[in-house]
Image (cartoon, helix red, strand yellow):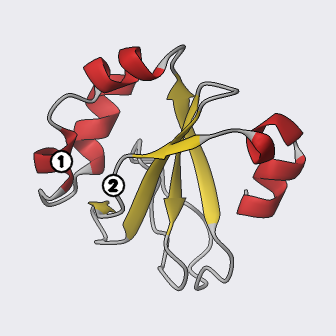
């Protein structure tokens, strides 16, 4: 979904504090993503950078469109109840984010 739809679906998202956990996450196609957490909803989400070609999502599922992304596209990774719990779950993210296809590291933490 695009970022505007994401916020329209739940106004608490728009009004909430957000915490960013890096903007250099990459997938197998070298697209870049920004990772953020919405305090009010507990949602951790990825936002793909504009003009990237999205070939697969963070779980390895291929997307049908080969068109350039014209809007900021959002994928919800999961829900985490508190910032402290999220920080525990993401311990080491600064280094992991810089690795090739770093979304696999993120997927391992949220697929269980």
Q: Are marks 1 and 2 in contact (CB under 8 Å)?
A: yes
**What label sits on residue 94 in the rendered view?**
1
Check the image and report above or below for 64 versus 87. Answer: below
**What label sits on residue 10 in the rendered view?**
none
The residue depicted at 58 percent of the width and 48 percent of the height is: 75
Mark 1 or mark 2: whose residue is earlier in sequence: 2
Check the image and report above or below for 79 versus 36. Answer: above
* Residue 112 visible in the snapshot: no
Tell me if 42 is positioned left or right of 23 in this view: right
The quadrant of the image that shows the N terminus is bottom right
Task: Return the residue at label 2.
Answer: 22
The residue depicted at 55 percent of the width and 80 percent of the height is: 50
Q: CA distance from mark 1 to mark 2?
A: 7 Å
Q: Secondary structure at mark 2?
A: loop
Task: Locate residue 42, reporting x and y percent.
Answer: 60, 25
Depth order, front residue of 6/88: 88
Q: Secondary structure at mark 1?
A: helix
């Amino acid at each position: 979904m695009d970022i505007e739809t994401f916020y329209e679906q739940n106004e608490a998202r728009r009004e909430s504090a957000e915490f960013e956990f890096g903007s250099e996450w990459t997938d197998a196609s070298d697209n870049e993503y920004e990772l953020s957490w919405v305090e009010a909803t507990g949602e951790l989400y990825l936002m793909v950078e504009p003009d990237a070609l999205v070939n697969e999502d963070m779980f390895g599922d291929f997307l049908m469109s080969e068109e350039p992304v014209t809007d900021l596209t959002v994928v919800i990774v999961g829900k985490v109840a508190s910032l402290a719990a999220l920080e525990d779950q993401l311990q080491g993210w600064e280094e992991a984010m810089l690795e090739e296809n770093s979304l696999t590291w993120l997927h391992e933490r949220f697929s269980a």
